[in-house]
Image: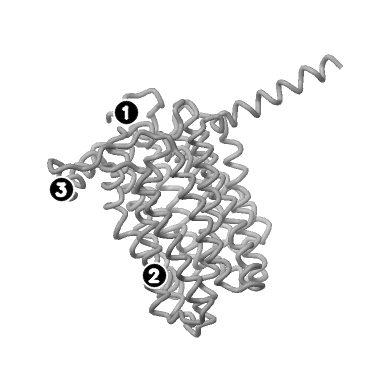
Amino acid sequence: MAVETERIPARRRWLGDRLAVLGERDFTLFFIGYTTSLLGSSMAPVAVAFAVLDGGGGGTGVGWVMAARILPVVLVLLAGGVIADRFGSRRLMLGSDVLRGLVQALFAVLLAAGHAPLWAMVALVAAWGVGEGLFMPAFGAIVPDLVRRRELLADGNTLLGLSRSVSTVAGPALAGLLTASQGPAAVLLIDAVTYGIGALALAGLRLPERPAADGDRASMVRELRVGWSEFAARPWLWITTAWMGLFNLLVWAPFLVLGPLTAQRELGGARAWGLVMGVYGAGAVVGGLLMLGRRPGRPLAAATAAGLGWALPSAALAVGASLPWVVVGALVAGLGSAVCGTLLNTTTQEWVPAELLGRLTSFGVLGAFVLGPLGLAAAGPLAERLGTGAVLLSGSVWQVAAGVVVLGVPAVRNRRWEEDPGH
């Protein structure tokens, strides 16, 4: 009995050490609100797509609506970084949640009333995209303010990443059920409510507010130039950003486009592809859990090594592997995505001064994702010309080769937590 009574407290301490970040009042409040709103926003795209189809928009209409969401995000990201640095992330995120909540509520009302033409859907989704583009850099900049104990920052990013992974799996599944039974308007109304919960959580944070801008402030263009100079002065940051941007262009975008096509032709259809993506999401959840309480000595090297796993599912599809091998590749890729994302976010938050974090985050997000739409558009035509397997395999080879090159850069390979964050 004595052995058992000693084991129980030890297990509790093990779990408590890894969840200690939830003892931070502001982080926990934000985590609850963010997770709730994230679940709603992961449900909304399914509802919007079926709203367009139900309205007779067809595939072309869905494409217009998807583009209307992505384009504003890209256009306002940099402005969001400047605003976050100038006025504070909390204010910008609060305004973004309110804007997106109102947009989704109006969208739901129009659908319920039967007065939602395609142009109105495009306009509403574009406004939704503006809110998302403003939220992203502010989100990256606020996390260090929520976690007062720096040694817990990686755990905070891990838990937020877990929220994203779980919502990616659960949100679309739940949206499919609700859309089929209650209609798209109900899902969008739920999304509006979740944004309201997120806004209430932000309003309850006890963070120091930055002073409002005055007449002596530099222009937004000037502040962007300063941000770009600071971004370019950090090789570890722009190299990893370029690596992620080319990954999205050459690996992930073709995988998302050609993966379902390959599954339809060779693996058994939509059910097989759903299994692959579900296991990828599960791998990300497991990877996040494994990251709790861990800080590799060389975080950028560990992040880059973890990112090599993204090559596996594309390679498995390219060589005509059976479904179990594709699923194993997706699992490894999901694990690596959680490790890589957590470490890249944490290093940026720890090594970039607070007054620059919004702008440098916006440059990082823009660089990582701006080429993604081009990859999505080019994957199909390239596959028709070169073959699906060739496109997928070239992406896998690129991911491995690029990872080796990035690991060979001293600014990435040798960088440690304790180094001076000023360079």
Question: Which quadrant of the figure contains the C terminus?
Answer: top left
The residue positioned 51% from the left and 66% from the top of the image is 45
**Of the pair 194 and 371, the residue shown nearer to us:** 194
Check whether the beta carbons of the residues at disc 2 and disc 1 lie within 8 A of each other.
Answer: no
Q: CA distance from mark 1 to mark 3?
A: 26 Å
Q: Pointer 2: what residue?
A: 67
- Residue 306 lies, in percent from the top left, at 51, 41
Q: Secondary structure at mark 3?
A: loop
Q: As shown in the figure, which amino acid type bears the numbered disc 2?
A: Ala
In-front residue for pair 121/300: 121
Q: Are marks 2 and 3 in contact (CB under 8 Å)?
A: no
Identify residue for label 1. 421
In this view of the protein, which residue sits in the foreground, 190 or 334?
190
Looking at the image, is 42 positioned above or below residue 421?
below
350 lies left or right of 341: left
- Measured from the top left, where is residue 359 in percent x and y? 28, 44
Tag 1 or tag 2, which sits nearer the N-term?
2
Sequence order check, earlier mark of 2 and 3: 2
The answer to whether one can see residue 174 in this image is yes
Question: Is tag 1's residue or tag 3's residue first in the polypeptide sequence?
Answer: 3
Q: Which residue is pictured at 45% across the width and 57% down the height?
A: 251
- Point out residue 404 in the picture as x, y percentages from the top left corner: 42, 42
Rendered view: 105 above or below 355 = below
> For mark 3, does the 10 Å Cα neighbourhood hold few (<14), some (14 to 19), or many (20 or more) residues?
few
Task: Determine whether the residue tagged by mark 2 lies in a helix, strand or loop.
Answer: helix
Task: Quote the CA–CA distance across marks 2 and 1.
Answer: 38 Å
Q: Are circles 1 and 3 on residues that touch, CB within 8 Å?
A: no
| Residue bearing mark 3 | 219
